[in-house]
Amino acid sequence: MKNKTLPIFKAIVTDFLFWFYVVGCGRYLVYQWFEVHLNFNYHIAVSLFLTLLFFIIGDSIGKKFFVGSKKLNGKWYFHFWGLFIVLGLIVTFVVGWNVVEVKPVKFFTKFINAKNIVSGILDPNFDIFIPMLSALAETIFLALLATFFAIPFAFVLSFFAARNLMPKTILGNTVYIVIRTIATFFRSVEAVVWAIIFSVWVGIGPFAGMLALMIHSVAALTKLYSEQIENIDSGQIEAIKATGANQLQVWIYAVIPQIISPYLAFTIYRWDINVRMATIVGFVGGGGIGLALLQQQQLLRWHNVGLIIWLIAATVWIMDMFSAKIRNKLLKTQ
Amino acid sequence: MKEILSIKGLHKIYNGGTHALKGINLSVNEGEFLILLGLSGSGKSTLLRCINRLIEPSSGEISFAGKNVIRAKGTELRHIRRRIGMIFQQFNLIKNLSVLTNVLTGRLGYISFSQSLFLGANQEDKEKALKNLKRVGLLEFQKKKVMNLSGGQQQRVAIARALMQEPNLILADEPVASLDPATADSVMKYLGDLNKNDNITVICSLHFLSLARKYGTRVIALKDGKIVFDGKPAEIDEKKFKEIYGEEAEEVEIR
């Protein structure tokens, strides 16, 4: 006899959350369309009522996925749970449409508003080519330094974030999990957010942008590097261990030779990404071409904006092409 | 005859629950060329890897040259390992490094960490490496990258690497299973030569009875983690062969 309380509990919670969401969506739409504000107590009460009603009837989403029974099998459209899922999707779409303020008519009739920027792109102002080139150089150097400074940190961390290298002890597992979690967290915070933090910290300018990209790169490279380590040939590690080598010697002679080319490839790829991100980071105070773009846009100098857009596009295109070529070469010699 | 390796009541149960070795008792004398026979999954690889603790045994006793292998830790374990050379089916050389550097990695157990950063700086080791490369007939390949070598050549580099350890014992885990028959025999010849002329004890797992008869001085057969035969190569007749490999098996001849 298996424990049946937990699945039933899970099912009820799932059903309640589902109804709470659906009723909430309904409440939002009623407010949007009829400007009638419904009391929150009704919201709870109706959700609870629907949860219990369909739980007693015995056909609900929670029952289907956590408790399950023969009665609930078969085609989805013969069951309440299937219809409820469709209902959930429909209200999500309708509410989404309202929240995002989708207005297709505007898209097709108000093109005239974009006239300025389009004419700027079609007729860029080459007089500012040289100063903008130096702003672009700032961005590229910023990305390069961010990548460069990220390498040693990511390199060391990646060894501790590789499952196959960490000993299967409590300490080894803890280190592995802590480093992986921190890396995931730092990566999930966008570089733009880091740039805002650092532009407050060290002041607006390329240094703040570099720090933002560096943090992000350390996290991303740690993940990429450590996955590379996890894919290495364990036979070579065995062979070096068998010679009586210590752990450090095993890393130097069995691990590093296997990862050096892919590491380089990933690093170049990262630089490529950093150049792209550096322009965005410039927008929020990271300096470089991004900052110039923002300034020119705010001054409504659309022909200057046009030139900057062309410069960014050309740089990204060239970086992309070269980094792909170099990466292919490096990975082929594997 | 001096005993070099003694195994008593060795068990290995993997985390998944597989009982790979079920009470192995084995005594190997110095100078023997011991062949391990048995189907894939019979426990040959596990047994070989338990001897130098690349795999941790679950229970039992192993002693090598009078030293307790099971209890050894850290430096002591590494000092045991450096006297035991190992050769693998997939060669397990460091593919991006040169032949000479690969051979020199055989010295890692003897040198300090700082020395190991400059492999080949030590003249004595380098001469030893060149001598061993010459012995396996690959002197002119010393600067080549390992990945540009053929399978047979790679296995000979692996033998040279094992020789750098100045081993008393060489464990060979199906050293010729990835090679064509002619190359297989030439690799076995090198192992036979080390056994005869350098008095290095060899434990070698194989699938070919003909090679076992040609090079082995003693044969052990494993089946489901137990020793089912222990004797001279010549004692394996068709009946014994079928006991080891099952009724369906036919002996395949390789020369």
Image (cartoon, grey):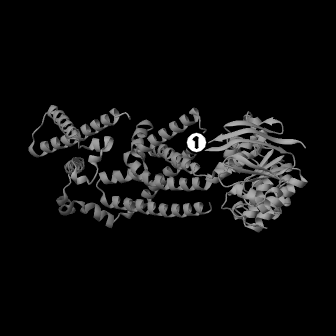
Above-or-below relation of A250 to B235: above
Where B120 falls versus B139 (above or below)? Answer: above
What chain letter is assigned to the residue under label 1? Answer: B
Lateral position of residue A167 relative to residue A102, left or right: right
Quarter the N terminus of chain B occupies: top right
A54 or B71: nearer the viewer: A54
Above or below, A243 relative to A137: above
- Crowding around mark 1 (Cα neighbors within 10 Å: few <14, some 14 to 19, many 20+) is few
Left or right of A170? Residue B185 is right
Residue B246 occupies quadrant = bottom right
Q: How many marks?
A: 1
Name the residue tied to disc 1: B17
Residue A160: percent from the left, percent from the top?
Answer: 58, 40
Q: Is residue A232 visible?
A: yes
The percent position of residue A68, horizontal first and vertical second, equals 31, 43
**Image quadrant in which you'd find residue B208:** bottom right
Left or right: A150 in relation to A251: left
Q: Residue at x 19, y 43 (%)?
A: A25
Q: Residue A224: x, y in percent? A: 52, 50
Amino acid on which disc 1 is placed: Gly
Q: Position of residue A243 (x, y in %)?
A: 75, 46
Viewer-proximal residue among B59 and B132:
B59
Please tell me which residue lies in front, A292 or A317: A317
Residue farthest front in this picture: B239
Q: Is residue B149 among what the camera can see?
A: no
Classify the position of the C terminus of chain B by image quarter.
bottom right
Q: Kindly identify the residue that appears in the image at 46 percent across and 42 percent down.
A: A184
Secondary element at image label 1: loop
Q: Nearer the viewer, residue A98 or A234?
A: A234
